[in-house]
């Protein structure tokens, strides 16, 4: 099948509150929203890049350039018989995985809509609800942190992740653990520590954490294996796992005991599912991370999280945790048991609010076959 038309939009959708990690701050979603057209049907995808190269090397500007100059022209020339063909097509592209994922997600949505099958069913999902938690950014004070966590716990979130960095690690983690002894709690360092700080990191073992996410360098697997031997708490890799091969290396080296799968980080659903399968064979649980997506990317993440080895709660919070208004007509809502429903409509199962999308679009281009 030929894809006939591809539209890419750059959006800006402000967050209700800025999101601060160990190394940067995000004020708005700066994703690229992709729309494919073929045989009278459409498919939507989100490439959730950030404005700067702080999480990985990609930015809104680089992804826009790669899509316009390389990826969209490649896809328009290709013959696509199944969504996995998009992953295969882009294997010869180095890096730029979030940009690639926007098109790959849209292909899954397109094929799903054509077949009348949900993305979750296409991927082999086994649940109609997925466990979710909330990722809490660095706060100006412990008091502010406790107030923010209190709000999320009151909203129904039963798993909380704290962003940590040197000087904002032991005290905030202790404070939250003391206030909520039974809360499922984990931390994320976004690559800010080095192996020399292993003894400091080992102090986090006192707080009964589910996991410590990406303590060391964004491209490291080797030192994480050394660090894991010195921690009781499972290490979870995020940034370092950019492909199924990277997942295999990490598993063979015992560099982690948990993997955060963000399908965008690995180029899309095809690679994400392969990593899921590898981890399952190794007896390593996975969970679905997030990139502060709109409802378009969130729908893809929720569908992925319905696969069997997603046994830990995902960073897939309700639309209201991020935005005053989402770009999908039915926002994602938190159920009282800290889950989100998996959409069961065709494809990703969400309907894009085109009028609202138009109001947040900063730039767009369109190419045809
Ligand atoms: O490291 O998991 C991360 C957001 C942007 C970039 C990196 C990360 C995050 C989050 C937020 O932790 C997860 C979400 O709620 O989407
Ligand atoms: Mg992370």
Image (cartoon, rainbow, N blue to C red):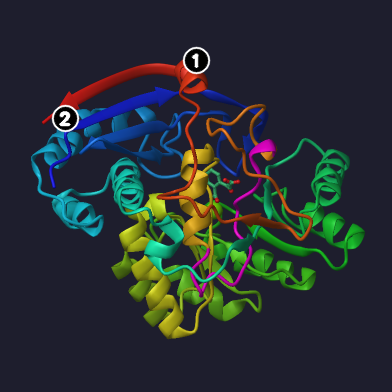
Foreground: disc 2 or disc 1: 1
Classify residue 28 as left or right of residue 263: right
* Residue 103, horizontal then vertical, whole percent: 29, 42
Q: Residue furthest right?
A: 179
Q: Measured along the vertical axis of the image, is residue 69 above or below residue 189?
A: above
The structure residue drawn at horizontal position 31% and vertical position 28%, both measured from the top left corner, is 8
Residue for badge 2: 69
Mark 2 crowdedness (10 Å alpha carbons): few <14, some 14-19, many ≥20: few
Q: Which residues are magenta?
A: 306-320
* Residue 79, horizontal then vertical, whole percent: 10, 48
* Residue 68, horizontal then vertical, whole percent: 21, 28
Taking the magenta stretch, the answer to whether it contains residue 228 is no
Residue for badge 1: 359
Q: Measured along the vertical axis of the image, is residue 146 above or below residue 76?
A: below
Q: Nearer the viewer, residue 331 or 174?
A: 331
Tell me the quadrant of the picture where the C terminus can be found: top left
The structure residue drawn at horizontal position 38% and vertical position 32%, both measured from the top left corner, is 33
Indicate the quadrant where residue 287 lies.
bottom right
């Amino acid at each position: 099948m030929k894809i006939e038309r591809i539209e890419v939009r750059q959006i800006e959708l402000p967050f209700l509150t800025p999101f601060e990690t160990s190394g940067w701050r995000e004020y708005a979603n700066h994703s690229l929203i992709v729309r494919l057209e073929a045989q009278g049907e459409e498919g939507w995808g989100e490439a959730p890049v950030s404005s700067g190269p702080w999480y990985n090397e990609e930015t809104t500007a680089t992804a826009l350039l790669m899509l316009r100059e390389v990826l969209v022209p490649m896809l328009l020339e290709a013959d696509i018989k199944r969504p996995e063909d998009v992953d295969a097509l882009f294997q010869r592209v180095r890096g730029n995985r979030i940009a690639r994922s926007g098109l790959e997600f849209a292909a899954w949505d397109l094929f799903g809509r054509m077949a009348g099958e949900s993305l979750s069913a296409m991927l082999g999902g086994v649940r109609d609800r997925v466990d979710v938690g909330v990722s809490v950014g660095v706060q100006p004070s412990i008091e502010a942190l406790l107030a923010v966590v209190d709000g999320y716990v009151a909203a129904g979130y039963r798993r909380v992740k704290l962003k940590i960095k040197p000087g904002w690690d032991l005290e905030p983690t202790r404070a939250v653990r003391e206030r909520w002894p039974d809360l499922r709690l984990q931390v994320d360092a976004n690559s800010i520590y080095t192996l020399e700080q292993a003894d400091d990191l080992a102090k986090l073992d006192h707080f009964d954490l589910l996991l410590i996410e990406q303590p060391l360098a964004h491209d490291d697997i080797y030192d994480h294996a050394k660090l894991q031997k010195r921690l009781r708490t499972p290490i979870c890799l995020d940034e370092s796992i950019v492909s199924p091969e990277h997942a295999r290396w990490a598993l063979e080296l015992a560099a982690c005991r948990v993997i955060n799968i963000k399908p965008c980080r690995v180029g899309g659903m095809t690679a994400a599912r392969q990593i899921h399968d590898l981890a399952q064979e190794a007896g390593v649980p996975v969970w679905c991370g997030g990139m502060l997506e709109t409802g378009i990317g969130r729908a893809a993440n929720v569908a992925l999280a319905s696969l069997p080895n997603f046994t830990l709660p995902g960073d897939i919070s309700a639309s209201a945790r991020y935005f005053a208004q989402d770009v999908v007509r039915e926002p994602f809502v938190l159920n009282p048991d800290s889950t989100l429903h998996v959409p069961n409509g065709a494809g990703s199962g969400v309907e894009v609010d085109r009028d609202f999308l138009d109001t947040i679009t900063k730039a767009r281009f369109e190419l045809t076959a």
